[in-house]
Amino acid sequence: MSMPEEHRVVLHLDSLLEERGLTLVELSRRVGITVANLSILKNNRARAIRFSTLTALCDALDCTPDELISLAPKP
Amino acid sequence: MRPRLVGIAAILAQTALTLLIAAATYFSLIPAVFGSGGLNLANGMLPSFKQKLMNFEVDPTPQMIDRVVQAPEADLFAWKQTSNGTVDAATGLPPVEASWMGGWSVTFLNPSWTDRFWYAMPAVASTVLLICVLLLMFKMIGTARVDRFATEPNARRLLAIAVIIGVGGSVCQVAEIVGRHVILGRSAAAGLFEIEWFFSFTPLMAGFVLVLLANLMRRNVALRQDLAGLV
């Protein structure tokens, strides 16, 4: 998993999608975010996330923020 | 503005800039370099419509005014024929002609290479700088066609345009003033006329405004980079 150099935040979107049996397209329809932007989140290429986006994802995936986001250990 | 309209506007602007570059080259640069009123590198071979005599506006000194008052009908700068050609009768220098058309001007006939250099170089330099500005603008407008106008390279181009206009424009003005002083000081009209000159701060002010715009564009680029990757 590649991360932008300036942070160690990791999103576990792919594992949560698999657990919930959802596809990226369905999640896009539920949260109102484009598939392209969700793909950016899923591949850890995002540099920042809005609170509104975080809220919508947690509602759609029925999870808490700490289940969705974690901090990778220091190298 | 719709992308297609932006594209059409950019093409029209680039076409206009191309025509301006061609016009500046044909009407200003070529006569200054090759014309008989400039450096005369074509040695008089250019068609006559591109040639003009070396001439600029002057102010009479008190000495000149006295001369005119004392002998109003006399020829101001009489010529004589010598084995080396026509020269000024009083000084033996290349002939000059003074005329009044609402203001005094002096025409320098048969100027030396040094005189041609001082007369033509400010015009050549300012035309070359103008062409550089037009080429930079052409490049910037080309990026608008692919929706990449507010970028770091364009901010650098805008800064370059600002420096060319502000510094280059001012230096060319000073060079023209100095050049005219040199030409007049070496001529048969020296001491009888002085240079009428004026320094405009417009290029510096325009350059300053463009520097501000370039910095604004840089800020725009930095803000967009901050937002890039924000979901």
Image (cartoon, rainbow, N blue to C red):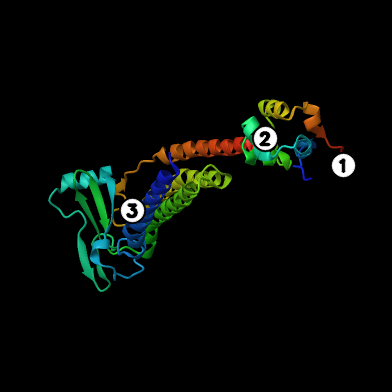
Q: Amino acid at mark 2?
A: Leu
The residue carrying mark 1 is: A75
- The reply to whether callout 3 and callout 1 are in contact (CB within 8 Å) is no
**x then y, percent, for residue B125:** 42, 55
Give the camera-side residue of A39 and B130: A39
Instruction: Give the mark nearer the N terminus: 1 vs 2.
Output: 2
Mark 1 vs mark 2: tell me if same chain. Answer: yes
Q: Chain of mark 3?
A: B
Return the residue nearer the eye: B100 or B61. Answer: B100
Q: CA distance from mark 3 to mark 1?
A: 76 Å
Which of discs 3 and 1 lies nearer the camera? The answer is 1
Q: Are marks 3 and 2 on the same chain?
A: no
- Within-10-Å neighbours for mark 1: few <14, some 14–19, many 20+: few
User: For the residue marked with disc 1, what is the amino acid?
Assistant: Pro
The quadrant of the picture occupied by the C terminus of chain B is: top right
Between A40 and A13, which is closer to the camera in this rendering?
A13
x%, y% of residue B119? 36, 56
Chain to which the residue tagged by mark 1 belongs: A
x%, y% of residue B76? 20, 53
| SS for dot 2 | helix
Circle 2 sits on which residue? A27
Callout 2: few (<14), some (14-19), or many (20+) C-alpha neighbours within 10 Å? some
Q: CA distance from mark 3 to mark 2?
A: 82 Å
- For image coordinates 36% across by 51% down, the residue present is B16
In the image, which disc is placed on residue B184?
3
| Vertical placement of residue A71 versus B104, above or below | above
* Residue B229 seen by the camera: no
